[in-house]
Image: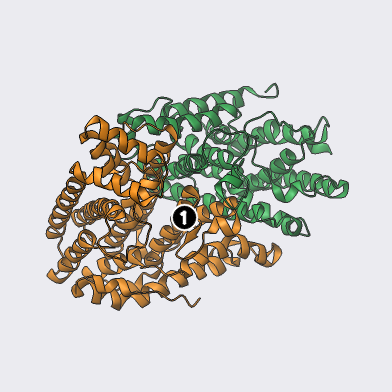
Amino acid sequence: MSHDSEMLSRARSVAGRAFEEWIPRRCDPAWLDFVSCPARFTWDVDAIQRGFIDPLYDCFDARPEHYRPSLTACLLETVGVEPGCHSLVLVASELPYLATLIVQCLRNGRTVRESMPEQTTIPIPVLVTVAYTARQMAASLVIDHGTSLAGDARTWLAYRVGHALSQSGAGRAVDFAGAGGRLTQGTALLEYMRFFLTPLTFVLPVDCALAAIGAQGQPFAQPLREAAGCAGIAYRIAVALRPTTRSFERYPVEPTLHCLAADVRDGEFAGRLVSLAVAQRRAAEEALRAVPSDLASGFEHFLRHVVDKSLQEMTGEADGRGI
Amino acid sequence: MGAEYNDNFLSDMDPVLGDHYRQWLPFCRRAVLDTVDELAVRRFAGPAAGFDPSRLDAEALNAAWVTPFREYLQRSGKLLRPYLICLCMDAYGRDPADRPHQVGLAEIVHSSSLMLDDISDDSILRRGAPSAHQRYGTQVAGASASSWLNICFEVVWNDRESLGQDTTTGLIQALAWEHFVTGLGTTIDVTWPWINDANHKPDEYLQQVLHRSTSYTYRLPLKIGGWVAGADTADRVQLSAFGERIGLAFQLVDDVLNIKPGDSHWGKEVGEDISQGKLNLQVLLALQRLASADRARLHEILGSQTHDQELLSEATSLIERSGALDESLRLAQDLASEARQCVEALKVPKIFKERLFALGTYVLRRNR
């Protein structure tokens, strides 16, 4: 965390508060009535606490980086919008990521028993339901409670959340199905990452910011999204290639990419990946040229303090862009 | 995709409903399969989305993402959800053929949720063939299902110009909310066996069912139907309320049939819920009402995961003696009456009200 700027620290802090504002650590019937609808019968609050809130916070607390909502908050701050006024979009950018982390420990077994990871005490039916509920909560919060957004921005952002989840799900299916060997050839890997990994990496957080400032239809929205896609690819490669494995962590900083894991020990392939990451980092900066300077500066700030830091960790060099 | 659908179940329905259902069934089949084809081949993965499948690996995408899902669609099903949308549209004078994507998406949601349910329940079979996670693995099946579940937002968004802004927003809101509350209901369902505490309340079970079983089967299709049919706000509220009530009644009747099937065609093991130790309404009511020795005995059988028919019969007898089955059926009847009132309030021709009444009757009176 020593590389953090003040802006990123503020962003991380507001993201943490936003999460607790919208999803309290202690569940109660009033909150359940609020996020769904008034109970016709009686909520089993204890079951929701133990079967959803506690496992969700276990993951949330284990990964304090909150990069995605921090990116959203940085973008808002640089255009003069108080991120705390859009706390809900910060939560929407974090929930799908947490959902992916929660189930990433499962094996691709043919039965529940075969799929059970060693390090969890939570049964698989509960685990997959925590992930499901967290995933699906984002769109519901946005469209039902996103009062800080204009009406059309709410609908658009809910659709974008669904879109990102759909792309990400298809990508995870392909990755787990063992298509790795084929994906790492030619242009396939870049296409795979661009299409399936980037939506839930940094594109959705950018969409959240665009919706908050009502700019989703502006001409610069697409280049900003393009920059987010390229930055996301650079970052995900960097995380996958980090020399230190942190096996003691309950949740990895990013879900494992099986398509890379198989070939990453191959020096030539790893070298190609490093080049790809660096090229994508540059492409992100290129794309930002078509974005208004205030928004671009917020994104560049994030690039320097998060993406470049990951690239530096990947290569061990002082400047991630200068590899 | 030559899926063959068995329509024998239509003979259990009043002809006023069954004949109309039969009339729309071929269209429902086509709408579902064509929508999936379009999403898989042209819209989602096609050049229009800025993606050239030949540059990735169309075979890998097809094998991991499309095939596990398509296999579920190809297995026999009632297509009740697409039909409910057709029923609504016809009732309000709209042609369902104008909205094949929205008709199709109700079944896409349903099949996705079945794939996820099968993982949760670790079901070996689905409609006579291996479940998706048995065939492709838990992660592949779960990720593919999640993708298809959420592609529905895309189905709506891509048609936003012809749907109009209000309907687009209404449909996305309905999908987002139902997806989320299904998670809450399922959380309660899967957490109960884990925390192993039998002191739950009947009302907690009903709240769980309200957000689990009723959602994708009745409430969501009727919400979609209301929006694409152009029903006004008051009618959409009534359609949703109707779906909620018959959905709840359906589950209560289903729970009763699980231990006391009405005929020999009941498709599951008799007493399966007792074998699995499920705490449904009738069990929770019985546990409240039985004297302590009988209550302890019922607890014991529920916790034993037995398939012994004598023990299952003993548990059934305890539940029945407590009056819990009658109470469950009485509540189902009350819900059906409330559902009838919802239909009465709709501004649709009489024949369509009769069809919805018949649907309520089918749910309540079925034997299997």
Q: Quadrant of residue B302?
A: top left
Characterize the local packing of mark 1: few (<14), some (14-19) or many (20 or more) Cα atoms within 10 angstroms: many
The residue type indicated by label 1 comes to: Leu
Work out which quarter of the rendered image holds the C terminus of chain A and state it: top right
Front in this rendered view, residue B134 or A150: B134
In the picture provided, is B103 more to the left or to the right than B133?
Answer: left
Residue A269 appearing in the image: yes
- In the picture, measured across the screen, residue B210 lies left or right of residue A6, that is left
Q: Residue furthest front?
A: B310
Task: Residue B103 in the image: state x and y as whole percent.
Answer: 37, 67
Say which residue label 1 marks: B149
Q: Quadrant for the N terminus of chain A, please.
A: top right
Q: Taking B110 as reference, is A280 left or right? A: right
At horizontal 69% and vertical 64% (from top left) the residue drawn is B57
* Secondary structure beneath label 1: helix
Instruction: Say which of A155 and B6 sits in front.
Output: B6
Chain B color in figure: orange
Looking at the picture, how far across and down is residue A218, in whole percent? Answer: 51, 50
Q: Nearer the viewer, residue B360 or B40?
A: B360
Q: Residue at x 39, y 33 (%)?
A: A47
Q: Position of residue A133 (x, y in %)?
A: 45, 42
| Res B261 → quadrant | bottom left
Numbered-mark total? 1
Q: How is the image coloured?
A: by chain
Most foreground residue, B160 or B364: B364
Residue A287 location (% of width, % of height): 67, 48
**Compared to A315, does B77 lie above or below?**
below
Q: Decide if residue A82 is in sight here.
A: no
The residue at 27%/34% (across/down) is B295
Side of B241 where A145 appears, left or right: right
Q: Any idea which chain is the green one in this picture? A: A
Chain to which the residue tagged by mark 1 belongs: B
